[in-house]
Image (cartoon, rainbow, N blue to C red):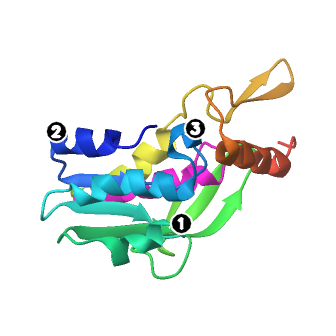
Amino acid sequence: NHFGEIDKLSKIAMPDMGIITNIAHSHLEFLKNLDGVYKEKFDLVKNLNRNGKLIFNYDDKYLKRIKRDIKNKCQMYTFGFQNGCDFQANKIVKGRANLKFLLNNKLCINLHSIAKHDVYNALAAIVCARIFKLNYKSIKEALESFSFPEGRLRLICLNGFNIIDDTYNSNPSSLSNAIDALSEFTNKK
């Protein structure tokens, strides 16, 4: 949440791989604006090992700049909903307490989540898993059995009532995502 933190930590860790899910309105107290958030996260990209692997959300307008701004020879892998991504979510269908999507128009994956932005997180995990040569069957099983942590738009059914627990933390982007998830939520079984 401060300028220079990612630079310092990535120089210590000397990462072979980096994942950037988005540039959003978080940590603005010290990073000031989205350009500041991008600048701070870009330090991870600058400090990747020469042949490192970078995974990023191609739908994020700030992250599209990475291809222009990058100087090192890392391998890039993209994910998102748009055409042209290496790993694309298609045909997203929202159920009462789940989301289904097709990965690259082929593999159907069912997440136990009410939040569409969790598809982005799943895509980032899929890219990482494929880099480490996990097969699609194992990836699908792991994602479909995953329970999202408490406080992260988790649906709780209690005595006939539905409670959506989003108490972990908040910033303008996460609040917007929570409102979207709530507005699309249906109480029908």
Which of marks 1 and 3 precedes in the sequence?
A: 3
Circle 1 residue: 60
Q: Earlier in the sequence, mark 2 or mark 1?
A: 2
Q: Are there few (<14), some (14-19), or many (20+) residues within 10 Å of tag 3?
A: few
SS of the residue at dot 3? Answer: helix
Q: Is residue 42 above or below residue 168?
A: below
Span highlighted in magenta in the image: 110-131
Read off the residue under disc 3.
29
**How many numbered circles are shown?**
3
| Mark 3 and mark 2: Cα distance apart in space | 25 Å
Q: Is residue 122 magenta?
A: yes
* Magenta span dominant secondary structure: helix
> Which of disc 2 and disc 3 is earlier in sequence?
2
Quadrant of the image occupied by residue 167: top right
Residue for point 29% across, 71% down: 70
- Tell me the element at label 2: helix
Q: Is residue 35 visible?
A: yes
Q: Disc 1 marks which amino acid? A: Asp
Look at the picture and state if 169 lies above or below 64: above
Q: Is 183 on the left or on the right of 181, as rendered?
A: right
What is the number of the mark on residue 12? 2
Residue at position x 21%, y 54% from top?
47
Mark 3 and mark 1 in contact? Answer it, CB < 8 Å.
no
Secondary structure under the numbered disc 1 in the rendered image: loop
Residue 81 location (% of width, % of height): 56, 70
The crowd level at tag 1 (other Cα within 10 Å; few <14, some 14-19, many 20+) is some
